[in-house]
Image (tube, coloured by chain):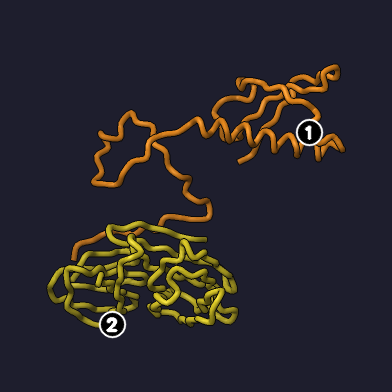
Chain colours: A yellow, B orange
Amino acid sequence: MKYFKRCEEFYICGSKDKKRELFAESKEKSLTLFQIIVRGKGRLITTFDSISIDGNKGDIVNCKSMMGKDRVLVSDKDSEDFYEVYGFNPLDPSEDWDAKKITSSFRGDNNSWIICFDGSATINGKIVKKFDYAKLEDKDYEVEVADALLGVFTKI
Amino acid sequence: MKILIKIEEYLPETQQIVVRFCSSQSEKSIDEIEPLSIDLNQLDLFDTELFLESLTVHGQEVIERYEQLQYGEDIENGPLDITKLLGRTIERKKFPKRKKLISMKRIEL
């Protein structure tokens, strides 16, 4: 099953299925800058060159090198029964973004968004659940990560 | 989308059939759709399956032509104002069947 959500400055796509599945994306739709692996593990490959990127549970993988190329996502047959992967995509393909996984408190800025892809965390005393997202400001964020998979995405 | 076909008349003298085509998604009953006459030499008469297949291709073209006549406005994105959408016929691409919306929720931190 594929998933999709358009947000204010980006959109999120996702795939969630049984193990050993293939997902293909044509170059016209190949706009994912980062893949966020919530469950399972897999390999991302392009069709006409030798680029391949491996990702494991909890990783935020930079796949800018695959922008505009036909790509195939292969989930690992020895991985968990189900895998769940999301993609961060710019609304405007010419935009560049940076991403980092949040594991502790950090300082935000006005060009960034935080997204919780799994579990729940406490940020500035507020409980943040799976699929909650927020625009950040130029201030400190006190984070208790717990079991959450949190990513901050910054427009460069 | 499925196609519904109803052959109303067979005219052996002129080698024609009179047939109605309808999309399964149509709100109208097939009996309310205007019938068309088709020359049998445009169809494959080898057996029932090939006959119906060639009739389906024909019907698909008829339905697509009809659907192209049904169009609405493209709406530009912007802040939501439902009153500005009232009474307008809006055209949107179908949301893919194998795709679901992620229930993301914006919060303030």
B43 relative position to B27: left or right: right
Residue B48 or A105: which is nearer the viewer? B48
> Spatial distance from mark 1 to mark 2, Cα to Cα?
67 Å
Residue flagged by tag 2: what amino acid is it? Thr
- Nearer the observer: mark 1 or 2; the answer is 1
The residue wearing badge 1 is B43
Image quadrant where residue A107 sits: bottom left
Q: Which residue is drawn at 64% across and 36% down?
A: B60
Q: Residue at horizontal 80%, vertical 30%?
A: B41
Say which residue label 2 marks: A103
Task: Name the image quarter holding the N terminus of chain B.
Answer: top right
Residue B3 left/right relative to A132: right
View extreme (left): residue: A139
**Picture coordinates of residue A70, whole percent (x, y):** 52, 69
Q: How crowded is mark 2: few (under 14 residues within 10 Å), some or many (20 or more)?
A: some
Secondary structure at badge 1 equals loop
Subunit ID for the residue under disc 2: A
Q: Position of residue A21 (x, y in %)?
A: 58, 70
Q: Which residue is drawn at 20% across and 81% down?
A: A105
In-image side of B18 versus A46 (left or right):
right
Q: Residue at x 45, y 66 (%)?
A: A30
Secondary structure beneath disc 2?
loop
A83 relative to A112 in the view: left or right: right
The label number, if any, that marks residue B52 in the structure image: none
